[in-house]
Image: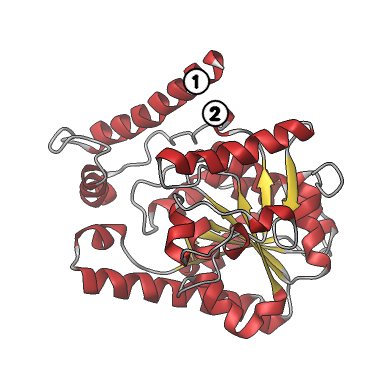
Amino acid sequence: MKQSGYEPDRYVVSKFAKYDLVLLGETHEVRENCEFVASLVAPLYNAGVRTLCSEFICSCYNDRLAEIVSAESYDESSVVGLFRGGPWPTWGYQEYMDIVQAIWAFNRKLTADAEPFRIVGIDADWKQFDLLTKREAERFRIVQAREEHMAAVIEREIFSKNRKALVHIGFAHTVRHGERLAARLARKHDERIFQICLHHEMPGGGRARNFTKFIEETIAGANGAAVGFDVVGTPFGMLRDDQGLYFRMLGPNSTFDDFAEGYVFLKPMQKLTPVTWVKGFIVSDTFAEAKAVAEKLHWVEEGSCATPADLDAALAARLAKRQMTSAVIRQSR
């Protein structure tokens, strides 16, 4: 770790010396993940990478996105509107929107003749509500169509134009097995892609948490600082965990490097914090679907929110409670 680790931003940017596309896989709703992505804009640009692809914005908004990040003044209300009009009716998270603002702020510092940094939405036109309520066959169709759409956008906007891009996306889409985004892209562009996993609790419960604990203890033994490092071709790559969900999904002989090529550790799990709610994100036009989704996910009790303001306050309280819980855990360590 001491010999081969890099500062996280240097690690991510260094991969573009060999690869055209770097998939940065996160678990959602973590403030530090979004702040890290925002901090990469300048070093990416200086390394010749001029595009961030985002799972969290629909591709149908890309023309508007280009206008926003190139405008003289930042249009916050329009950015909120883009997220409000996406597939996730409860995705009112400030730090994801702050990434757009960071790109706008960076572009404002460029000379008039310089190429601007772009953000490209890759998500499809679908509804989270449908994914939670439709029959299994229809849910499968939605998921596959979404992966196909995201791959097509990246093919059109990046590979066909011989560009380089960082892709900010949920971790599950970055695994090169099955039919998710990375697997689809790798069929044609395997040697042009690198995947990085942002540190998170490996799912599986019980003993599976020992895997995350091992990673954190190993890093603490080095110096405990934020770090990026290769998994493939290192001792980390051969790690196994028969209790971990990812390992079980890929088969009994799977190893860490089957689903993680690189790894970025920002903070230990107990020091990571949730994102911030955008007050007023829920409006009358989105209320019905947002309420149904929040109830399906058990974020609010059924029938407890009669108005958009009720639901908005409840979702803000949900995140505030998580923030308080995180603070208590940090203080107890």
Of residues 111 and 292, the one drawn nearer to the viewer in this rendering: 292
Of residues 284 and 179, the one drawn nearer to the viewer in this rendering: 179
Give coordinates of residue 148: x percent, y percent: 45, 77
**Residue beneath the point at 87% across and 46% down:** 3
Within-10-Å neighbours for mark 1: few <14, some 14–19, many 20+: few
Give coordinates of residue 98: x percent, y percent: 59, 43
Does dot 1 land on a helix, a strand or a loop? Answer: helix
**Residue beneath the point at 62% across and 76% down:** 157
| Quarter assignment of residue 164 | bottom right
Q: How far apart are the alpha carbons under marks 1 and 2?
A: 6 Å
Q: Quadrant of the C terminus?
A: top right
Q: Which mark is residue 329?
A: 1
Amino acid marked by disc 1 = Ile
Within-10-Å neighbours for mark 2: few <14, some 14–19, many 20+: some
Q: Is residue 262 above or below residue 1?
A: below
**Count of marks, rendered view:** 2
Query: In the displayed structure, does residue 119 sit left or right of residue 20?
Result: left
Q: Give the residue at mark 2.
A: 270
Of residues 113 and 189, the one drawn nearer to the viewer in this rendering: 189
Query: In the displayed structure, does residue 278 sit left or right of residue 264?
Result: left
Q: Residue furthest top?
A: 332
**Residue beneath the point at 30% across and 72% down:** 140
Which of the two discs, 1 and 2, labels the residue nearer the N terminus?
2
Amino acid marked by disc 2 = Gln
Circles 1, 2 touching at the beta carbon (< 8 Å) = yes
Give coordinates of residue 201: x percent, y percent: 51, 42
